Image: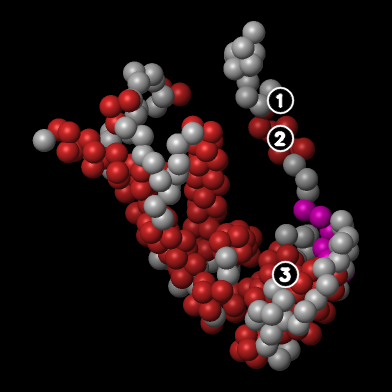
Amino acid sequence: MDIFTIFRGELTYPDGFASMVKRAPQQRAEYHGMQALLEEISQSGLEQLREQTVPPTENLDVENLASAAEKFQNIQAEFSGRSQLLALHALVIAASRRRNTPQIAQDLFQKCWQDHSRFLLEKLDMRWKLSALQTFRDLGTTEAQRRCAGELIIFFNMMKLYETERLYSGASAETAFDPKNRTGKKLPLKLTPYSLGHGDLDRNLLGMLWLSAEEDPVLAPLACHLLTEINRDKRNIFRRLRLMRRVLKRRRR
């Protein structure tokens, strides 16, 4: 029997989604001494931290770090030679992933993005920008921050899933499919296919996310930056759809 037909007729997730949530790992216990460490580090002010450089630091090869000091040492090892503000920002994000996140973590995170968004956007890579987005969902102080961040997290995760599966098509990320190769197969769940020639689902989706991103002045720089990066990128589904649409329109002339 072919491997691709073995599971036909079965549920993708046999035990359903509720059981998956129950099996999901719970937030782990907070890092010991996190509040005191954040108070100590931030005492000099974020402006001064921004100008300070992280000294060369050895990474602790420990599977389960228990204390905030240990976690910060590993963060400093990652940001060695770079601004201490980036290390503090990462530590605040780490604190938000554990139970009983201290209030100072939320305060510092908001302060980082309220006063230093341009610096953070210039210095952080995409991994840390997306981590910051998740932290806006967890430590957001407004409904707009939490809602928009949650929407964008789902959006980027779905994009990651789709683009990862597409890697197995054999086509490069820059290469659009030929519109003439469309099959007559139906979409799952009886969904109506996107109209390549006249559809505006892509523009409506991105436009709604943009409007949502603009609602909060603290989140807006990060959220709008991430959406703009999608607009610039030449290797994603939205750029490929645009190329396919151009090819289709030329052939119809």
Q: SS at mark 1?
A: loop
Q: Which mark is residue 15?
A: 1
Q: Which residue is located at x 62 percent, y 24 percent?
A: 12
Q: Quarter-wise, where is residue 6 in the image?
A: top right
- Whole-number angstrom distance, CA of label 1 to CA of label 3: 39 Å
Earlier in the chain: of badge 3 and badge 2, it is 2
Crowd around label 1: few <14 · some 14–19 · many ≥20 (10 Å): few
User: Could you tell me the amino acid type at mark 3?
Assistant: Glu
**In front: mark 3 or mark 2?**
3
Crowd around label 2: few <14 · some 14–19 · many ≥20 (10 Å): few
Residue to which mark 3 is pinned: 78
CB within 8 Å, label 1 to label 2: yes
Left or right? Give the position of 136 relative to 233: right
User: Could you tell me the amino acid type at mark 1?
Assistant: Asp
CB within 8 Å, label 1 to label 3: no
Magenta region includes residue 225: no
Crowd around label 3: few <14 · some 14–19 · many ≥20 (10 Å): some
Name above or below for residue 204 compared with residue 252: below
Q: Which residues are magenta?
A: 27-32
Q: Which residue is located at x 32 percent, y 49 percent?
A: 203
Name above or below for residue 129 compared with residue 186: below
